[in-house]
Amino acid sequence: MKIEKILEPSFGENMYILVDEETKKCAVVDPGGAEDKILSYIKNNGLILEYILLTHGHGDHIGAVKSIREKTGAKVVAHTDEKELLNDNRKNLSCMMPHCGPQELDADIYVNDKEKLTLGNLKLSFIHTPGHTKGGMCIRVNDDMFTGDTLFAGSIGRTDFIGGSYKELEKSLKKLSKYENDVKIHPGHGPSSTLGIEKTSNPYMSR
């Protein structure tokens, strides 16, 4: 398994390409922009894009979704509770993001908590973590977890947008705290970390 990180400079958003090196099948996590870089990496490495995985539906995380889906046929995966946000460019804030413009879309596959998908030989597990958005989720594969804007290294995502709730985010952080310390987190912004580090040093998790 390989994880390639690509930065979308307009909002400092992390996008990831998750690769099953044995089958060459891959998924893109939260493609907010930099479409050319993403598609070039996939083409240059002989990869097959199966899924576009969304941790949540804010504009800085979905800006390149429709274009990549049209060009590759990849299936978009999101949590069931994120449908409303994805369908409304005002609620998902993309109407205020000039780098991508207003974005409205539907996922091809809506998932719920604890559901799984197969990517080549990899097993993807979906963890519903509302708080930043109503349908926010984390995606775990082996000992890696994509946490979107739920959990950052040393911080958490905002809760003052539509669908946000600090109380819900607190519950989501407690949910994540039950996972193993050595799970590496790959957030939507900033550097990677581990759950063990965040449990002991992140003020929002160590309360």
Image (cartoon, rainbow, N blue to C red):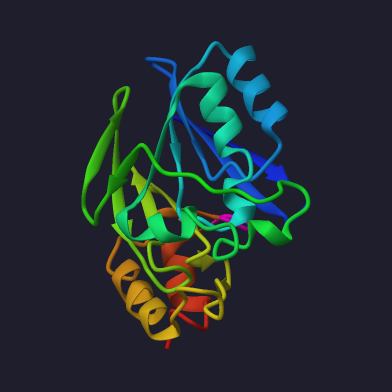
As for residue 36 lying within the magenta part, the answer is: no
Above or below, 32 relative to 170 = above
Instruction: Tell how many labels.
Output: 0
Would you say 32 lies left or right of 111 here?
right
Tell me if residue 114 comes above or below residue 18 in the rendering.
below
Whether residue 20 is visible here, answered yes or no, is: no
Q: Quadrant of the N terminus?
A: top left
Residue 180 to residue 49: above or below: below
Q: Quarter-wise, where is residue 166 in the image?
A: bottom left
Span shown in magenta: 188-192
The quadrant of the picture occupied by the C terminus is bottom left
Side (left or right) of 25 relative to 10: left
**On screen, 24 above or below 1?**
above
Q: Residue at x 57, y 47 (%)?
A: 62
The x, y position of residue 24, in whole percent, is: 44, 16
Instruction: Tell me what residue is drawn at x 47 percent, y 76 percent.
Output: 164
Apparent side of residue 122 relative to residue 193 in the rendered image (left or right): left
Q: Which residue is more in the foreground, 160 or 2?
A: 160
Task: Where is residue 191? Give x, y as percent.
Answer: 63, 56
Q: Position of residue 158 (x, y in %)?
A: 57, 75
Res 32 visible: yes
Q: In the displayed structure, does residue 171 sit left or right of residue 156?
A: left
Q: Position of residue 21 (x, y in %)?
A: 44, 20
Q: Nearer the viewer, residue 56 or 87?
A: 87
Q: Residue at x 52, y 20 (%)?
A: 72
Which SS does the magenta portion mostly show?
Answer: loop
